[in-house]
Image (cartoon, grey):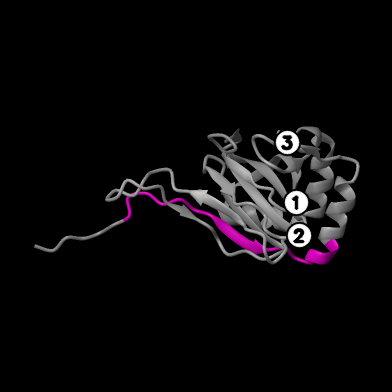
Amino acid sequence: MKITTRTLFAIPHWQFKVKDFEIKRKALLNAFKPFDEKQNDPEFADFTTNRYSTADIINTFSKIMNDELLIISKTIENDIAVKEVWSVSYKTGGYHPVHNHGSTGLSAILYLNLPEDSPSTSFLQPWNNVLTDKSIYATPNVVEGEIVVVPSFIQHFTQPNKSKKIKKTVSWDIDVITNNEIF
């Protein structure tokens, strides 16, 4: 008897380089200047962010990153809308604990400054290994100027930044619009 192995579920993710990255990096850094990053609770994690103060930046961000937003829209074959956008900075030892961005939509990370000794983001598979019951995580190889897009429900985290230089990301949550409904 022949047994066929198939994948019952798969979790998509997308990864690509930003067009004209150096120009867009400067524009994004300038756009975020008015939105000070604040220290997160040091007992919880060590990073600074402006996640909750960036409502006015969505339009500016969308204009700067228009090419990349179109790529995401075309790739998933649906219209999208940026729901929220923010920056995060990690000094030496800074990290982000396990978290997700909700049950619907997509979330994206742009690696704006990624020093050599800085870890990229790790993503947890939503189920354990069926044989060992251990957690499974994946850490895509990324370089500065790349974007990683995942479903918002995926738990993710970063290891502590080992570099003496600041690691900086820009992240955003995306509503997916299908049949005039937002997901």
Left or right of 53? Residue 3 is: left
Number of residues whose C-alpha sits closer than 10 Å to that of mark 3, classed few (under 14), some (14–19) or many (20 or more): some
Residue placed furthest toward the left:
1
Q: Mark 2 points at which residue?
A: 164
**Numbered badge on residue 17:** none
Badge 2 marks a residue whose secondary structure is: loop
Q: Earlier in the sequence, mark 2 or mark 3?
A: 3
**Numbered badge on residue 40:** 3
Q: Residue at x 78, y 48 (%)?
A: 62
Q: What residue type is labelled 2?
A: Lys
Nearest to the observer: residue 116 or residue 148:
116
Q: Residue at x 46, y 50 (%)?
A: 11
* Residue 22 within the magenta-colored segment of the rendering: yes
Left or right of 132? Residue 33 is: right
Determine the image quadrant of residue 44: top right
Please report the bounds of the magenta region as a residue range: 7-23
Badge 1 marks a residue whose secondary structure is: loop
